[in-house]
Structure formats: C-alpha cells, structure tokens
Amino acid sequence: MSIRVNPMFIDDLVRYGAEDVQLCYQCGDCSTVCPHADEVYKFPRKSMRLLQMGLEQKLETTLEPWLCYYCGQCSEQCPREADPGETMMSLRRWLISRYDFTGIARQFFRSRTTEIIAILITAVLTGTFLLIYGFSGGNINVYDGEGAFLPSPFIHKFDLSVGAILVVFLVINAIRMWYLVMIKGTPFDVPWWIYIKQFYQLPWHFFTQKRYAECEKKREHAVYMPWIIHLGLMLGYVTMLILVMVYIEQLQAGPEIRWQVHIFGYLATIGLSIGTIYFIRSRFKKHYIQYKKSHGTDWVFVVLLFIIVVTGIAQHIFHRTGLPEMANTTYVVHLMSVVPWLLRMPFSKWAHLIYRPLAMYFAAIRRDALVRQFSIINSNPLVVK
Amino acid sequence: MCGTNIAKIVDVEAVAKFVSDLPNVVLAKTYKYMCSNPGQEMITQDIKENKLNRVVVAACSPNMHERTFRNALRSAGLNQYLFEMANIREQCSWVHTDPGEATEKAKTLVYAAICRVELHEELESMSVDMCPNVLIIGGGIAGMTAALEIADAGNNVYLVEKNNHLGGNLARIDLTAPYLYSARDLLTEKITRTSNNKKIHLYLQSKVTEVTGFIGNFKATINSLNGTSSDKSKSINVEIGNVVVCTGYKEFDASRIVHYGYGKLPNVITSFELEKMIRTGRIETKEGKIPKYVAIIHCVGSRSQEFHTYCSRVCCMTALKYAHEIKSANPESYISDIYIDMHAFGKGHEDFYRRSSEAKTLFLMYEKGDRPVIHKAAPKDDCEMLIEVNEKLSGEVIEIPADLVILMVGMEAREDSREVARIVNISQDKEGWFIESHPKLEPVATTTDGIFIAGTCVAPKDIPDTVAQARAAAARILARIAKEKIEVDALYSEVNENLCSGCRLCNTLCPYSAIEFLEDKKVSHIISALCKGCGVCVASCPSTAIKGRHFTDQQVLAQIDGLFGVI
C-alpha cells in the first residue's frame, strides 16, 4: 500500500515551530549523535523525513517524538542547520493536537491570540464566580473559619471539580494516544501480558525522568542541570496538586504553621520557584540550544506559572501576618491563574506530563512485542521472512 | 624508484648491480625520482661525462615519461631515439606481490631493453607546413567560442553548421544553472560576433562530407544541405590545417521508457518542452491550468542499465533551476524533485541545492535500478497524476501528486556522430561519444593528429566545461599555427620499393589511411605525416617490404631474445 505524500504539511508544521526542516538532506548525523536513537526507534532522521514528505498517518502513530528529551546535540551537529531538536519539539506539539479530541490544542498552537483570549475568559469567569460566592456568604476580612470569604471546604470542592474536568480530558486523550500508537501504528500482535510486564515503566519514568538524564551520556561535558531543575519542578507540581486536592483544609488553616503539611508546601514552592526562574532566564539568555527558540505557548506557560507562584507565596504570607483582606484578594488572583493554567494543560505542551511516561511505556511494549514477532518468524520456517 | 612505488616491491639496488655487470653497460644508477628535474639533469650530466651513446631508464610506462627522458637525451646532445624504457612499475611493482620474483622480472625487462637499445638508430623527426586555416564542425556554444578565439588571432575559420541558425542546444534554453544567467544573453553576443567576423566563413545548413590529408594539410569538402546532393555548385573545397569537432548532443527520447507514459499522458513533458513553455512565459498544463503539483523526475535515460549507464551531468542542476523558475512563476505550486542522487559537483552548485531546499522543494530519493511509475489519478484526487515510487530515505512506498511531470532527459550522442567520426577519422566509445587521445591529459586531442574535439560530443558536460574545452582546442591550434611548421614523430613505416610487389594488402589495412598506391611505379607508398607507426602494414606485408622505423624486426627480436636469454 502506498501512502500519499502531502507537500503542504511542512507549511502547516511551521506554526508548531518546525521552521528549518526542509533544509535536512538526510545525512543521519542527528541519529548518530542522539543518545536515545537505536535500531527500533530511528530518530530524529526518520521523523524529519516523514515530516518533509508529509506522511501524517505515519507520523501520528509514531512514538519517536516522545522518546526525545531535547538535549539539543542533534541541532548542534546538524551540518544543514535544519534544527532536528526543534523539529522533534514541534512534532510533540503537533502530536498533542492530534491526541486532543476537542481541537482546542490545535487552535492554541496555531494562534497565540486565541490562547490568550481563552485564558483571559477563563480567568475572568473564575474570578467572577469566586467574588460572587465570597460576597454572597462571607466577609472579605475573614480568611478562614466562620464567615470566611472563601471557606476551605468550598475551595476543596472547587478544586476537585477542576481536577475532574482535567482528568476527563487527559484520560480521553490518553486513550486516543493508545489507539493511534498501539492499534493503528503497531502492525503486529501485542499480547496482554506485555502490558502488565512493562507496567512499572509508567511510575518509573514519571518520577525519575531517567531518560532525560541519559541524554547526557554521550556528551563530553555532561550538563545535568536542566534534568535536576525539571525533576524538581515536576515533583513540585505533583506535591502541590496532592496538597491542593487532598489537604486543602489543613493548608488553609492558620495562622499558625502546620509543619506536617506546610513543609511539603514549602519544598514544592522552592522547586516551582527555582524551576520557573531558571526556565524564564534560559529562554531570555538562550545559552542552550533547546531554549533558543520559544514558541508562543512556551511564554504563556512560564508567565502564568510565575504569577501563580508569586500570588501563592503572597497570600500565604498575608494570611500568616494578619492581613486577611489582602490574603483573600491575592488568593482570588491566584485561583484566577491556577484554573486556566490547569485547564490549559491537556491542550498544551505540558500534557507531556502524561504523554511522556505513557510513550515510554508503549515504547517498551512495542519493543517487546517486536522482539517476540521476530522470534516467531525466525522459529517458523513456513513464515516468509 | 618512483618513491616507494617501485622500490617497495622491486629491489632496485639489486637490479642496478645486476645491470652494471652486463657487457656494454658503462653506468648503472638508482635515483629516488628519475623523472624529476634533478633526475633528468643527472642523466644529461652522465651522458656528457661518460660519453654514453645509449640510455635505458627502468621506471614507469613510456606513455608517462618517455618524452621526458628523450628530452634529457636531447639536452645532452644525443639523438633522442637512442633511448629505451623498461617498465618496472606497471609491469612489476604494481602487479606483483612477491619481491623476489618481481625483482627477477625487473632484471629481465631491463636486460631486454638493453638488448634492444643496442640496435637503435639515430632518427630525425620531420617537419611539415602548417596551414593556418581551421575547420570547425558545429555552430553551438563550443563551435562559436573556438571559432572566435582562432579568428580573433587572425586566422581563417570555416564554421559549418547543420541548422539554419547558430546557437545549438543552448539556443533552446531559457536560463542557465546555477547563477540563472540568461542563455540568450550568453548567445547573442557570440552569434553577433561570429556573424560579423570577416575571418569566419559561415556555412549554415551545410555539412562536411569529406576530410582528407594530414595534420597541417587537410582538405575538406563542405556541402550545402539546401540543394540536392547532385548540385555540385553547392559543394565547396577548403584547405585547412586543423579541425575542431563540436557537434554536441541530442536529448534522450523519453517515450522509450514506457512507465513514464510520455506521449500518452498529455502532462508528462520533457525538460526541453518545459524550456519552451518558460520562454513563452506561461507554465501550464495542456488544459491551460496552472499546475498545483509539479513533479520533476531525474535521470531519464541516464544512469540505467537499460539505456545509458553514464550520468548526463547537467540535469540535476537544471532540475533545481526548474524548481526555482516554476516557484517564481507560480508561488502556490508544490514541487517534488524525484532523484537517484543529487550531483551538485560544480562551482556554486551546492549553494544552489541549498537554496532549493530553503524554498521547500520536496526532494524524494529512489534506488538506482528502481523507477517511478506514473498513473492517472482517480477523479476524487485533487491532482491529475500520481507517481508511485519506493522512497529510499524513508523506506516507504509513496504516491506523489502531480499535475505536471517534467522528465529530465539525458544527453545522447547524435545519430550522425558515427558518420562524423568516419569523415574525420576519429573513434567513438560504445555510447557513441568521441574518444579523447587521453581522458585526463589530452582531453581535446584525438588519436588523429590535427583533429580536436570539444564540448558535449565528447561526453555530457555543462556550459563552463564546454567553453573551456573549446578554448583549450583553440589554444592548441593557435600554438601550432604560431610555429608555422609541425614536427612529426619519426616513428613511421617505410616501403622498400624494390621489394614491394604492389599487392596493396597494406592499403586497405592501414587504420590511418596513410598508405597510397603509386600507379606509375605500381608500388605502395606511406605518407609519413599520416603514419602513426602502428605496424599493421609491417606485419601484413607478404614480401617483408615494409620497415617500421624504431620498431625494426632486428630491434624487436633482440628485445625478445633478451627476455628469454637471461635467467
């Protein structure tokens, strides 16, 4: 079966950030230097080729873009300045828009204005809702306890509702990813027990991001900083998410500090602050190749995160220093940023939080199934090789 | 020693020692590079000091350095033919691995050379007048360039062109790759100057039907193609000293490749048909639509076992030029460039290739030996044709949409090249291209002295190379004209008229048409200026009446004796 080439695809991918892919002449230097490419998963060369030729049906079933952590060595080596690292990044953005059933991700990636308007609308709606609720039953001068402006049981329910929406989107998209990758894109049998055998990959990659560190294994002067910062930032999110979704009442109580809860909050805040500042600084300074090009969506993310971190710290301090009015106000601003930031996740690059560990899991399954397929073919002389 | 080329296998010191003990040998020496200036000076010095009267050099092939060493003899005041070379490089060190045996063989070869050189005679080269007129066959860019060069130096040029206009294949082209100069601009100036030059005698719609004679003294017949062949008044005879053949190429007939559907699918066209479209200013399909998808297929007729195995050299860059021209004319169109390898070897070519990549030309590679297949698309497709090919870099079998397909037809020798070769007495290779005297060191000379070849009648090449060859041929001819006389090698055969029975066997065998029959004396006579000393007549003569100078029976037999005498 032959697949139709789509010469227009390359123009479309420019909006996702792949500006130089047409320069690639397939020398394969990128795949040679890549610490992750191997015989089964050939990238970036092969991915660049599929992109150049516009073979969308092939591309949407590939895992290769997720196996890249963008160390940038390929882009440094590329003799044609075709920027394979950025191309893989763009393909990840494109894949996210492919997994997303709503089509929102596609709109966001293709137009920064649409994204900013959507964020502003969500923020304003959140703010209006919280203010109406607060003024209808509470007092702006009370932070917690009786007559509180935003009582913590209410916030708890609010958080869980936002979380539920988030989970629905992510689960549906993850299933779509599974269908594209494992059903459409895997032309051989995958027995169920391989799914179980390789299941450990999910938490393992989620919590260690070991492959990110392995990016440095071939480099002469290994740079582990981006990995450490990224890991800290990610653990910060997860801790914060658990605190907000489960322990919000304890977190909000005060003004005394409950160390058994708050210590986690402080640690998470440190991780998030350092991460945010590091990434903003890197995107400005452009020392490393992976920060040379910033897509519009990248900036929206870091700016929102920065506001969240600052208002989060501020409302905590105001509450502890006896300024409930100030604390309530910053809290509303905080939530106005948190809600769009969280709801935006399934439609942005930050969905990689889910897709990457899933991709590692699927990649391991596919590899196992492929090896099994080969051993079946090799042991059965009747099967034509 | 030739550095280590010879010395690493052959024990040259042992050879020298062996030789120095032989009778008649005065001196035997080794030297690191005998062909170098100090090496030659050493030979000259030794001849003078030791009053040597024969010299043997054991080194490389005489093809390479016989002339060099003959000059060394000449500068020592010795006749240059009192010299012999033993080839202990190509015949020993390069072909043998056993040093012991190779050294023994080297000794034998040197001994044989010594046996032969003892019988060498002093010979004198002869000199003939050089007629300053030049005949140029072909009025393309090569012919005009050579003609102007020679005529500007004050010599008469007879420029013969088959068509009714000058310019050749270049006149069929719009822009040239990679700098996008207009071909018309390149040609107009040349055509005007050629037509206006008083020294250039232009024969359009004419053809050379006969060339006789030898270097410096050719006679040619030019026939007009206008009238009938019986029309004697249209036939002109000219006297010339040299000939430049630049008859160019013809394009490959694309209908020979059935897969491409050329001639059946209306929008499959050749590169020359596209050139015509570009010159009229509109690139469109037969239905008059602007093509959205354009596909360019490389190597049509070239680099294939079925048709021509060679590369036509210009098509890759021409294809990139089309990509550029089509994109500038129709910015909305998508161009797929379907190739085997991208040959971007020349000056500015790689940059041009890069610019095409930047302009998002989609490059698709297929395996040599494989071939794309063009189908008509289904009505539901948004294109007219689909090209199926096994794309090499992705490993996928793909379909490429196309509204217009351009076949990059390769270059072929002209159908009348055999006739031209026969008339001017030069050889052709199996593809029909004219053969140079040496592919590297004599790229414009032929085995027939005084006949030069330039441009795409020799092999496919681009405009700069063609012009360079034309100017090279012109320079060679001008140098000879400036000398007024030409020295002809003394290696020709002679007929002993007393022994000749007049059987005329040699007359028909001579590959250089150098033997005439003297009707009055009823004997054969060899025109020494035409004779190359090949020895065919010597071997064939039943009366042993012919002697090959410098290759006498005695000399050759002495050498053979030498080969078997030792060991």
Image (cartoon, coloured by chain):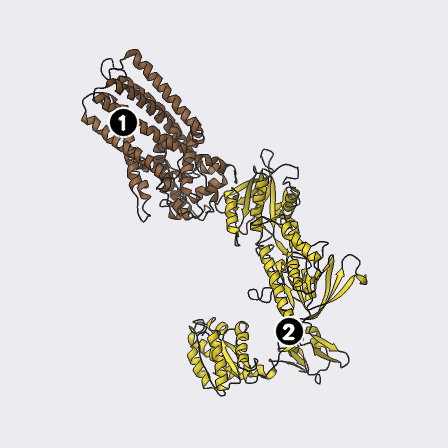
Chain colours: A brown, B yellow
Callout in the foreground (2, 1): 2
**B172 w.r.t. A337: above or below:** below
Nearer-the-camera pick, A275 or B499: A275
Label 1 crowd bin: few (<14), some (14–19), many (20+), radius 10 Å: few
**Image position, residue A302 (x, y; %):** 34, 31
Which quadrant holds the N terminus of chain B?
A: bottom left
Tell me residue A345's x, y (percent): 36, 28
| B391 vs B521: above or below | above
At x 37%, y 32%, the residue is: A299
Q: Are marks 2 and 1 on the same chain?
A: no
Residue A217 placement, left or right of B342? left
Whether A348 is drawn above or below B564: the answer is: above
Residue ID for mark 1: A242
What amino acid type is highlighted by mark number 1? Ile
Q: Quadrant of residue A229?
A: top left
C-alpha distance separating marks 2 and 1: 101 Å
Confirm or deny contact between disc 2 and disc 1 (CB under 8 A): no
Q: Which residue is mark 2?
A: B486
Q: Residue flagged by tag 2: what amino acid is it?
A: Ile
Q: Quadrant of residue A338?
A: top left
Left or right: residue B496 compared with residue B114? right
What chain letter is assigned to the residue under label 1? A
Residue A376 visible in the picture = yes
Q: Secondary structure at mark 1?
A: helix
Image coordinates of residue A65 in percent, x first then y, are 40, 39
Q: What is the tally of numbered marks visible in this picture?
A: 2
